[in-house]
Image: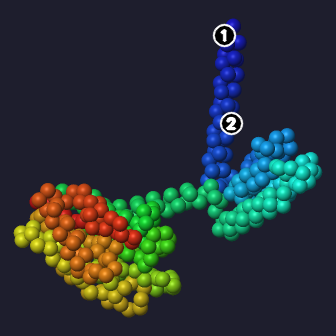
Amino acid sequence: MAGERAEAETFGARLKKRFHRARIGLRRSGVDYFRGDGSDWIAMVGLLLTIPVLAAVTVVAPVWCSPAALVLPIVAGGLLLRPANLLGLYAAAAAALIVESVLLGPYTEGISRVTPGVVLTVAACGFFGLLIAQFRSRVGVPWRRGGTMLFDLRERIRVQSKLPNLPAGWHREMALRPAGGQSFSGDFVVAARTHSGRTLEVVLTDVSGKGMDAASRALLLSGAFGGLLGSLPPHAFLPAANGYLLRQDWDEGFATSIHLVLDLESGDYQLLSAGHLPAVQLHAGTGQWEEKAAEGPLLGVYDGAEFDPVKGTLQTGDVLMLFTDGLVEISGRDISEGIDRLTGEADRYVAGGFRGAAWHLIEAVAKDVNDDRALLLICRDA
């Protein structure tokens, strides 16, 4: 009796294990298909079965199902299938049209027939579907994987722009708003703590262009700049970044950048700029904002460029703001007016502190600007 029960339990356990493996395998196949790594034969079979079903319904109830309904599997095939399989689907759709025209009779005898307009509509959808499939084939990215790749791209830029934690007595925050409400921006930040964590190095860069047009270049540059930051002495970073841009040989290959090197123990800092807007510092003792403008040409313009630093010190209660031109530059208005507006709006946060102020400042001074906007705040707490 006990032996039979053990045998049954063993059989049940084996059956459960096989079912679990089948479920895992099916889930992995579904994930691979969604990501674009799996075969498209499942979609091919499903769409091929859809065509005779649509043809049969059209013949039985032509008023409810028009012959033009064949565009549905054709459009889906353009999104799901490879070009070679897509041609097979088109052949099946053409055969279905021929069968429908024979069984329904000439289009001059009534409605819901296979008319020349229906044939042209189905052929046009097939043509554009084939163009889309060939484009995907050339790029090598199935449509199912395209959205995932864009999501990964956005997340990588966001992670690379994350600021490191600072010791007690310091506060940092950044806000980034791409142009047109998109998810991608030509502005980015790379940052690192160097010299055993004593020094904070931050580079804010504005790549030429905006939104999606600049996103791919911003991703490439953020990765390269992140590798250079901390690996070179501060005075060598911008020359190395300039050489990297020159080697890319882009048609629209320039960028502006500002490099902050801050000693977290003393508060002393230096700024190096490559054609970027000046930073502004709030002196807590006087309540006045001071522009900190370093000299240097744009990145990617000519070789051998030199970048002269400007130095300063953040005392207790001081604030340093770095920003891109989308925040202060408006057509028909001088940049100095935009900076004055930004600092005037920032004065509202002096009494209560600047925690959470970066996002609100962008909303206040450049909410509807069709340009990438980035703002970085470094505060030495009182």
**Badge number at residue 2:** 1
Q: Which amino acid, by three-letter code, is at mark 1? A: Ala
Side (left or right) of 228 relative to 19 = left
**Residue 352 falls in image quadrant:** bottom left
Q: Is residue 171 above or below residue 100?
A: below
Q: Give the labeled residue for mark 2.
A: 22
**What x and y, as percent, mark residue 99?**
91, 50
- At mark 2, the secondary structure is helix
Q: Residues within 10 Å of mark 2 (few under 14, many from 20)?
A: few
As drawn, 297 above or below 112: below
- Please state the horizontal and vertical placement of residue 373, each as a whole percent of the image: 35, 69
Sequence-earlier tag: 2 or 1? 1
- Residue 350 in the image: x percent, y percent? 13, 62
Task: Using the rendered image of the protein, determine whether residue 226 is visible from the camera's viewpoint.
Answer: no
> Are the residues flagged by discs 2 and 1 in contact, CB closer than 8 Å?
no
- Quarter location, residue 308: bottom left
Identify the residue shown where x is 37% and y is 85%.
298
**Which quadrant, please, contains the N terminus?**
top right
Question: Where is residue 124 drawn, in percent x and y?
Answer: 76, 64
Relative placement, left or right, of 377 versus 151 is left
| Whole-number angstrom distance, CA of label 2 to CA of label 1 | 30 Å
Q: Could you tell me the amino acid type at mark 2?
A: Ala
Q: Residue at x 23, y 75 (%)?
A: 339
Disc 1 crowd rating (10 Å Cα; few below 14, some 14-19, many 20+) is few
For the residue pair 103 and 189, the one nearer the viewer reads as 103
Q: Depth check: give the residue in front, 145 or 64.
A: 64
Q: Which mark is residue 79?
A: none
